Amino acid sequence: MNYNIIRGGHEDLNRIYPMMTFDFESWELPKESEFHAAMLKGAELLLLKDGTGLECGYAMMLKSRGDNYVLLGWLGVYPNVRGNGIGGKFLSCLREYYSALGGILLEVTKYPELEKARKLHAFYQRNGYGDVKCEYILYNEPAALMYLPIAGPEDISGDIRVIIRGCYLPLYTETEQKKHIDIK
């Protein structure tokens, strides 16, 4: 079956945000109002639809303006279609959607402490994402920062602070970022 991505709007976010509260821990999920404000500054809510038009999942993307990268911040596949390879198809669609960019970054929280996080990390590795060489702390918790190069260099570790700052600017000011993100 074919899948495609469409860009969602504020009404879609109103509908999807309650699902996000089930998919993510409260400490790793910004307020709905923060997402709405971020969308006004360039963040994108993307919806995955199958060939029949059935919505299968969502992804909230934080896109840097000048650095040519995007951060896959929050991705969810709906429970009624989970386990059918939809997550991998969603990642393929995201790669195609952002094919002109340098690459896609993502964060796996609570890694390597939780089994769920280890499974997610392995899933992303199977889909072409590799670890960025840095110590990454997100919301005061250890996290794995992963990267899929598209048109950009294989190793972005030397530029990662600038790239992450640019990706998070639609959501957090630089001062707020210092409270939530630490890269060593």
Image (spheres, helix red, strand yellow):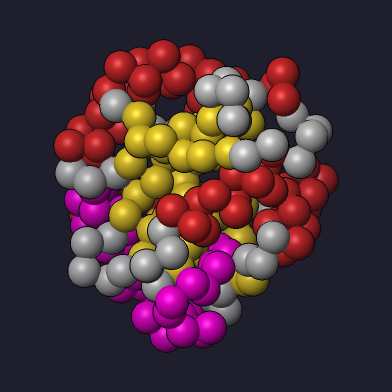
- Rendered location of residue 36, percent (x, y): 25, 29
- Rendered location of residue 79, percent (x, y): 70, 21
- Rendered location of residue 159, percent (x, y): 37, 80
Q: Left or right: where does residue 77 sit relative to residue 140?
A: right
Q: As rendered, which of 162 and 178 lies closer to the eye? A: 162
Q: As rendered, which of 36 and 141 lies closer to the eye? A: 36
The reply to whether residue 118 is visible in this rendering is: yes
Whether 158 is drawn above or below 171: the answer is below
Q: How many marks?
A: 0
User: In terms of image quadrants, where is residue 134?
Assistant: bottom right
Residue 33 is one of the magenta-drawn residues: no
User: In terms of image quadrants, where is residue 86?
Assistant: top right
Q: Left or right: where does residue 87 sit relative to residue 107?
A: right
Q: Left or right: where does residue 5 sit relative to residue 44?
A: right
User: In terms of image quadrants, where is residue 63?
Assistant: bottom left
Whether 143 is drawn above or below 150: the answer is above
In the picture, which quadrant includes the N terminus?
top right
Q: As rendered, which of 77 and 109 lies closer to the eye? A: 77
- Residue depicted at 51% across the width and 39% down the height: 4
- Residue depicted at 45% across the width and 20% down the height: 16
Q: Which residues are magenta?
A: 145-174
- Rendered location of residue 154, percent (x, y): 53, 83
- Residue depicted at 64% across the width and 24% down the height: 78
Q: Left or right: where does residue 144 sit relative to residue 17?
A: right
